[in-house]
Image (cartoon, rainbow, N blue to C red):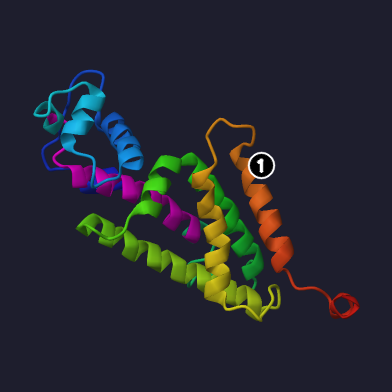
């Protein structure tokens, strides 16, 4: 079930012709990112869409409802990446499975692709500070994802694929901090597409993290 379906009010809201809840949500996320969630009112959103303030409530019940939908969009996608790449125990366990290092590379690559595909929603997620129940819930889900990623870094180091002298939590934060920083400068439709961007991030990150043969280290 989608995030929107889980959080929809019990009575469907039809809205005016030419707009559905998805269109209203896209406009709301854009405003939240430009003005800040706290500084954006339902009146601001109504004016952005050309509604009266009262008419906006035919589309959505509240501003926090829109925030919750937007945060769920990005978090659902990121949680799916963790699950599909085998970063989520117990899928990461067992003989004959894909090495943790390969799974880590995959989750970094897919995280970049999710960011590009859902950049407005991910940007909003990265700016929440826990000032509302929806934000607190989102931060709790982010922490759970961060924990699983740090465990995957630790597993990669334990199998000898990553250097062991750096704390796994620090490595995870640096890796995904680099991914998250893309929202500050990447613009959809630019010269670099999602695949090129993902490959560049993976190459830059992992060529610097892979262990070197002892002979090579001694020569340095």
Is residue 183 within the magenta segment? no
Residue located 45% across and 67% down the image: 146
Image coords of residue 112 (percent x, y): 55, 49
- Image height check: is 164 above or below 113? below
Q: Exactly how many numbered labels are in the figure? A: 1
Residue located 59% across and 40% down the image: 194
Image coords of residue 96 (percent x, y): 65, 71
Is residue 76 within the magenta segment? yes
> In the displayed image of the protein, which residue is found farthest to the top?
17
Q: Which residue is mark 1?
A: 196
Please state if 109 lies on the left or on the right of 72 as rendered. Answer: right
Magenta span: chief secondary structure: helix
Residue located 23% across and 40% down the image: 40
- Image height check: is 172 above or below 70? below
Image coords of residue 171 (percent x, y): 58, 70
Please state if 86 lies on the left or on the right of 164 as rendered. Answer: left
Q: Is residue 75 visible?
A: no
Q: Quadrant of residue 220?
A: bottom right
Instruction: State which region is magenta.
Output: 58-82
Dot 1 alpha-carbon crowd within 10 angstroms: few under 14, some 14 to 19, many 20 or more: few
- Badge 1 element: helix
Q: Nearer the viewer, residue 105 or 179?
A: 179
Please state if 78 lies on the left or on the right of 101 as rendered. Answer: left
Image coords of residue 14 (percent x, y): 16, 27
Residue located 43% across and 64% down the image: 145
Q: Is residue 219 visible?
A: yes
Please state if 212 lies on the left or on the right of 38 as rendered. Answer: right
């Amino acid at each position: 079930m989608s995030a929107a379906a889980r959080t929809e009010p019990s009575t469907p809201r039809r809205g005016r012709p030419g707009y559905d809840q998805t269109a209203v949500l896209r406009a709301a996320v854009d405003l939240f990112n430009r003005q800040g969630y706290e500084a954006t009112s339902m009146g601001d959103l109504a004016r952005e869409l050309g509604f009266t303030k009262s008419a906006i409530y035919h589309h959505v019940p509240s501003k926090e409802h829109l925030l919750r939908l937007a945060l769920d969009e990005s978090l659902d996608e990121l949680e799916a990446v963790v699950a599909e790449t085998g970063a989520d125990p117990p899928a990461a366990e067992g003989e004959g499975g894909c090495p943790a290092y390969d799974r880590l590379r995959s989750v970094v690559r897919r995280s970049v692709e999710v960011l590009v595909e859902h950049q407005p929603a991910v940007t909003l997620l990265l700016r929440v500070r826990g000032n509302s129940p929806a934000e607190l819930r989102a931060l709790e889900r982010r922490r759970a994802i961060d924990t699983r990623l740090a465990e995957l870094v630790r597993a990669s180091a334990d199998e000898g694929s990553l250097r062991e002298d750096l704390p796994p939590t620090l490595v995870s934060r640096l890796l995904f901090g680099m991914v998250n920083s893309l929202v500050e400068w990447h613009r959809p439709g630019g010269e670099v597409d999602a695949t090129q961007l993902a490959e560049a991030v993976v190459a830059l990150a992992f060529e610097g993290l892979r262990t070197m043969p002892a002979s090579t280290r001694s020569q340095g």
